[in-house]
Image (cartoon, coloured by chain):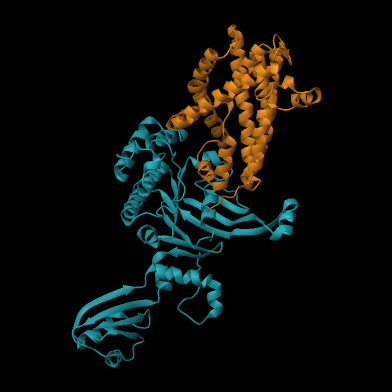
Amino acid sequence: MLSAYLEIIRMRFLMMLAYRVNYYSGILIYALNIGSYYFVYKAIYGDQTVIGGLTLGQMTTYVAISWMGRAFYFNNLDREIATEIRDGSVAVQLIRPYNYVYVKMMQGLGEGIFRLVLFTTPGMIFIWLLLPIDLPTDPGLWAVYLVMLFFSFLINTQLNIITGLFAFFLENNEGLMRMKRVAVDLFSGLIIPISFFPGWSKTVMEWLPFQAITYLPSAVFTGKITGAEVFGKLGIQALWFFILIIPMYVLWSRSRTRLFVQGG
Amino acid sequence: MLAIDVHQLRKEFQVQQSRGGLKGAFQDLFRREYKHVTAVKDISFQIPKGEICGYIGENGAGKSTTIKMLTGILVPTSGEIKVNGYVPFKDREKFVSGIGVVFGQRSQLWWDIGVVESFQLLKKVYRVSEADYKQRLDELVDRLQLSELLSRPVRKLSLGQRMRCELAASLIHNPAILFLDEPTIGLDIVVKTEIREFLKSLNQRYETTILLTTHDLQDIEALCSRVIMLDDGRIIYDGGLQELKAKWGKGKEVVLQFEYPVTLPKLHELTQGLDVAWQLENELSAKVFIPYERANVSEVLSRVVGVLQIQDIKINETNTDDIVREIYKSGSAEVKQTEDTKQDEGVLTHA
């Protein structure tokens, strides 16, 4: 069965290749985002050396690595699932001897790997040449970061699948999907690092799964979080991964009886 | 051995109702109103292994819903289903490896990549061995003439080409049962014929059980020994196509071309005592309707041919389209009984 799932990853990879223009425009959008955030933060820092526990150098690295990480974990599975449910093509998925949720997860992974190899890596080199970014030299830190980035992918994908599966229960889950997207971008620390938020909201965010998507791996990578604390944060990611399996499973098994295929 | 065994199968849906007006819209915001719709109403039927069975009915009669329950996509509200030895919605993943499904209106191939890539993936999904896959693919490519299509992306195929690829895709794992939901929809007559031929030979070679829904009765005539007709979620006919024709076909129509001009009274005189209806098209041509069991064609012809010079004769059987249209219009068999005016359209269900 594994070979089938590997094949699905490969197919998604091929499909991404089939639409190369999306890929080029993607690079441009990410570069613009990183560039503009860099200049915004440069202006905010002004004469100050440290804000929210990050130096300007760390902040620049944080912005770059967060966006590049996003390139890997981001996918549109929520929208894909919702569309498949709404137009009834989910029926085709159900006549195959595989698990729909796993397949979606693998498709997301195929997309992620595509962007990691052909997008994040060249993009990172490009940005590294343009902006003053300090990349860590410790290979151990790189390894930990990659593991954490993989958990970012898992958690973000789980949230996407959960949001997508709501299409079984809501006639239109467009609003929900938008809400999730904003929540992920804002509360994950992509736009503003969690440490910049005022006290009470920081506490709230530490209880939400979103920080595990961007903030934790990026903070570890930039050296904001170090030592034994790193493994604590990795634990938080793992914990969220296991917790999110529950709603995903419940939604999927309940949706089987809810399903009615629209449009004949 | 039964391939499909269905008992008292029922499917109900809850459909959201939108209330009209601004007030209704606000009410909907807080409390939705639902309407129960029963798409399939306690149907039972059995299909033995190796049979090709047609499943027909008007739009919205519940055909697709039934197929979706039989393939494990939908969970029935009540009743029992056993297909290929499995309860479809329970052991879905195990069950679907033994069936093939083609939805005429949905593609199961991956839109953006080459056809052969889709086949490769299906081979892995269904865990078909390399040797089996090769042999199977060669055969399918040969029979469905796919060799030129294999490397093309699916979005660049015409509908007919795509449908042939869909069929091949559903057969890569050599399923025991094949479900076809309107496989010939939108296809031209050449492709339709090819697909029918292919299905027939598939059935003969591998004893594949085939259940197909269609609106094209020629599909049924070409392929099926048996039809199940559905109306408003109930089975209104289950039996052979010939019997259906015999029961519902009202008679034959004969068109005659004469050598010399004829008149209606002359024709009536010739067939006196026979319960037939003449209609004069022009002075050289006439139509006669001969109802089943009340008159027979040879009797009528012998009387006419003996007296008048005939140039051409054409016998029109009531075609299945007409029959089925008639049945759809009249609805269930029970309604028919109460009407009681047309005796030749008696009770139909003999499931």
Query: In the visual, does B228 lie left or right of B40?
Result: left
Residue B295 visible somewhere in the drawing: yes
- In the current view of this chain or complex, which residue is farthest to the top? A137
User: How far across and how far down the image is residue B311, in percent?
Assistant: 19, 80
Quarter-of-image position of residue A178: top right
- Numbered circles on residues, count: 0
Visual hue assigned to chain B? cyan
User: How far across and how far down the image is residue B1, in percent?
Assistant: 46, 50
At 62% from the left and 22% from the top, the residue drawn is A37
Question: From the viewer's perspective, is residue B267 above or below residue B57?
Answer: below
Residue A11 visible somewhere in the drawing: no
The orange chain is A
At 46% from the left and 29% from the top, the residue drawn is A7
User: How far across and how far down the image is residue A39, in percent?
Assistant: 62, 19
From the viewer's side, name the closer residue of A8 and A39. Answer: A39
Question: From the viewer's perspective, is residue A63 above or below residue B180?
Answer: above
From the viewer's side, name the closer residue of A208 and B221. Answer: A208
At 60% from the left and 17% from the top, the residue drawn is A147
- In the current view of this chain or complex, which residue is farthest to the right? A200
From the viewer's side, name the closer residue of A168 and B85. Answer: A168
Question: From the viewer's perspective, is residue A65 above or below residue A111?
Answer: above
Quarter-of-image position of residue A69: top right
From the viewer's side, name the closer residue of B255 and A165. Answer: A165
User: How far across and how far down the image is residue A20, in percent?
Assistant: 44, 30
Query: In the visual, does A184 lie left or right of A85?
Result: right
At 40% from the left and 31% from the top, the residue drawn is B129
